[in-house]
Amino acid sequence: MIDAYQLSSTLAELAVSSLIEEVSLTPKPGLVDRNDQGSHDDLTYHMMIESAQSLRETFYQMAFESYGEKPSQYLRERIGEIGRQGEMRMFQVTKGVNTHKGAIWSLGLITAAAAIHCGACDEETLCFTAGEIARYEDRFIPFQRTNGMKAIQKYGVLGAKAEAQLAFPHIRHYSLPEFKSSLQRYNYEIAKFRALLALMANLDDTCLLHRGGMEGLIFAKRYAKKVLNNGNLEELEDMNEQFVKRHLSPGGSADLLAATIYIYKICQTQYAHQMEVVTTT
Ligand SMILES: CC(C)(COP(=O)(O)OP(=O)(O)OC[C@H]1O[C@@H](n2cnc3c(N)ncnc32)[C@H](O[C@H]2O[C@H](COP(=O)(O)OP(=O)(O)OP(=O)(O)O)[C@@H](O)[C@H]2O)[C@@H]1O)[C@@H](O)C(=O)NCCC(=O)NCCS
Ligand SMILES: Nc1ncnc2[nH]cnc12
């Protein structure tokens, strides 16, 4: 069995590389990528990469703390504490700009879930264990009236917290199935684009609601559905222009795309490790 040090290093590496793959996927509508800043005047590609790299230690600590443990309130609060320290580090690196707050939350819970199972579990189990951790209350969260909370109250949607507590339904039902079937039909790059579109077409993204209201969210969902159905990824350039014009950003879908890639990588690494054990014994 893989030990806690090895697993924590592997998970931290995979989490950071998943964040980097997400931001590097180009072109994306309204999001930062290699070409432009999308609808984010205060973000750059370089800043996103630095932010992702600054989180390696955060994911390492979350994994180390969770290795072989059971979901519990104690663990939830330890993960929360490590996550808040990660947020502080991120804000230091970005000089106060929110790059990966949602990602620390989603990928952090998935990291903890993978470590609980000592790296040996399937995609569904990862999501359900992450959900179980997220359902414990963290009594130490400082009160903040976030953009997410305002959108949840105003529009009656679920948001990032509930997405995790429900075991990431948008990953299990939309992005992961789309990603895996597109890998069979096309290639890794196209699979990532199609997974992003599948999220955008279905997720009530509070980042879109905060910036464009219900009209903005519906516009983004319809556009994504259209491109997903016609399969013409060349439309992504136009889509980006339309999103920038409307100041729209599907930041929540970007985070869940990184989480989808991460879950896929964790399971692939595990199979590769099992194959190694089988062939060397
Ligand atoms: C539970 C928390 C995630 C907090 O959630 P909450 O909704 O209260 O807070 P937000 O600050 O709004 O952050 C939620 C982020 O999650 C992403 N997201 C949005 N919708 C969904 C969804 N349906 N499912 C999953 N994920 C979703 C989204 O992240 C992206 O958007 C970011 C940009 O957002 P924002 O800062 O609002 O910036 P702008 O649009 O540019 O607006 P301006 O302010 O400039 O006007 C971008 O970075 C993407 O990452 C949401 O941002 C969790 O964080 C929590 O519990 N926090 C408490 C502190 C804590 O304990 N943290 C450690 C947890 S381990
Ligand atoms: N590529 C991206 N652009 C803007 N916000 C994001 N949040 C997470 N990924 C992002």
Image (cartoon, rainbow, N blue to C red):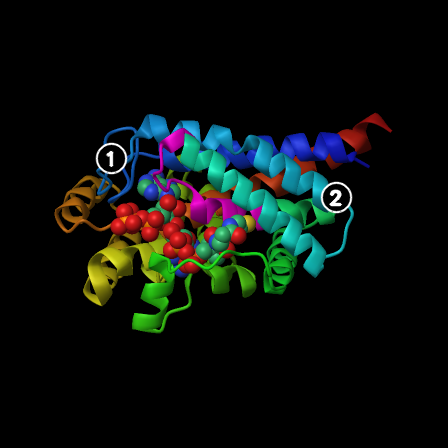
Residue depicted at 74% across the width and 48% down the height: 117
Q: Is mark 1 within 8 Å of ligand 2?
A: yes
Residue 118, position as x, y percentages in the image = 75, 43
Q: Is mark 2 within 8 Å of ligand 1?
A: no
Q: Which residues are magenta?
A: 93-109
In which quarter of the view is residue 97 placed?
Answer: top left
Q: Is residue 66 left or right of residue 19?
A: right
Q: CA distance from mark 2 to mark 1?
A: 37 Å
At label 1, which amino acid type do we have? Gln
Residue at the disc numbered 1: 37
Which numbered marker is on residue 67? 2
Magenta region's main secondary structure?
Answer: helix
Residue depicted at 37% across the width and 58% down the height: 146
Task: Determine if residue 178 is in view.
Answer: yes
Residue 30, position as x, y percentages in the image = 24, 44
Work out which quarter of the rendered image holds the N terminus and state it: top right
